[in-house]
Image (cartoon, rainbow, N blue to C red):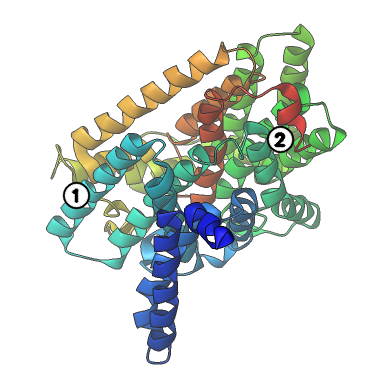
Amino acid sequence: MAGLALSARRLNPRVALWLGCLICVLIAQGIAITHSYLWAAPLVCVLVVAVATDLPIILFTGVILTVRVLSDASVSTQGAGSGSVGLSGGIGVLFILVAVGILLRRRRGLWPAAMAALWLCLWTAIAVLVDGASTETMRQTVREGSVVALAVIVYNSRGAITVSVAARLVQLAGIASALLAIYQLGTHTGLDIAGQIRANGTFNHPDGAVMFFAIATVASLWRYVDAGRHRSDALFTAVYAAAAAATFSLDGLVSLLVMLMAFGVLRPGSPRIRLGTYAVVGLLVIAFLATPLGAERIAEETSTKVDSASTHALASTSLGWRFYKWGLLITQWEENPYFGKGLGTTTSAEGNEVVTTAGHAPHNEYLRYLVETGVVGLAILLWAAVILIRRLNRLRKMPGILNAGTLGIAIAIGCLLDAVADNTFLYTTTAYAAALIVVAVLSSSSSTPRRSSLTRAG
């Protein structure tokens, strides 16, 4: 009797309630599946939300990120405008469900998450009001919502996903793709972009691959110089830098160079680290210019002339195509200048008889958000970006987190720069990698772990 009384006192009513709900869900799920998988889907969602806090968070995040990287090539290069929902959409929904379950229990970062969700809901509603409900609108909402969800998961990991662990997860998730990109360079295979064969690894486009590789390069460099100087991190740095160069993506490589320069300039400490960083930058530039395709790309893009009277000439180069597309976007923005047309509307914009741009992403995230969310929405995003940079800059000066703030600033600056001429945040894997590391940096300020705890993952 005493033993039974002791067990009763140890029984947490909340745990008992969750256990009872889970049993009911499993029973209802079994009944529903016998009739239709569609009816079972909501019950599965409830189950995922219920067990979210019990998931092995590091393993879960690493496996899902790896699957997303390896499956990226299965999404068509027109995927952003196709309106289809596949594995990428399923991964996005999974991240959102897990984040909801974690927030319900731990509630860390609740207000920023709620504001981000409100922002997404508002401009999704505008898209529905302007163009009606569509799969593409929901696809874009899930995409951006899943990035916020991953940030919530990392921020609520209770120190499990440190900066060092986040960097390692990105390294492991993309290494197969990076090695494949180097192989494609050596065998002259890959993706045919306007007659040029460029490496893309397992990604659907070289421009998407290069930013993931760039983030992994800088993260690997940080791990090497600030988290233990492991030889594996030096090897990861070399492999990812080579893979980034193999894509021959000009805007992505420029962003990588800027990230490396920012890391070298902002990082306090030995001048040898700065010189080493600058040496990596120099080697990347020399390697790019020394290859026939690299020299060809430079010559091609520098020949572009900004002449609004010659649309055929503008469309003959990658930069020219961007200028042409941006002109169409400005025209669209003028139709709804303040609140825009809603999320997902730019990826299904109509082209004309000269260059068909229907379904093609804008290749400028600022213009995309200007058209989709108007001046008001873009101003909110820029305000949030300024707050982020200021917060990371304060962390850069904080002792005890091994220059993690410098890493966060370098990645944030690189992504913001790449967004000027590319679809940085439409490439979901890039957004996941950036969110994983930057939010790990932000959450490190509350625990300020010792060096030994950061290097344990090495």
- Residue closest to the far bottom: 35
- Residue 155 position, x and y percent, is 49, 37
Tell me: residue 233, above or below residue 139. Answer: above
Residue 413 in the figure: left or right of residue 200: left
Q: Residues within 10 Å of mark 2 (few under 14, many from 20)?
A: many
Residue placed most toward the observer, 309 or 189: 189
- The residue located at (16%, 51%) in the rendering is 126
Residue placed most toward the observer, 65 or 159: 159
Residue 196 in the figure: left or right of residue 82: right
Q: Is residue 282 among the parts visible in the rendering?
A: no
**Secondary structure beneath disc 1?**
loop
- Residue 10 position, x and y percent, is 51, 53
Quarter occupied by the C terminus: top right
Q: Quadrant of residue 80?
A: bottom left
Amino acid type of disc 2? Phe
Residue placed most toward the observer, 8 or 13: 8
Amino acid type of disc 1? Lys
**Secondary structure beneath disc 2?**
helix
If you read the primary sequence from the N terminus, does the residue marked by circle 2 or circle 1 appear first? 2
**Numbered mark located on residue 79 in the image:** none
Q: Is residue 306 among the parts visible in the rendering?
A: yes
**Numbered mark located on residue 288 in the image:** 2
The mark closer to the camera, 2 or 1, is 1
**Numbered mark located on residue 341 in the image:** 1
Rounded to the nearest angstrom, the CA distance separating label 2 from label 1 is 40 Å
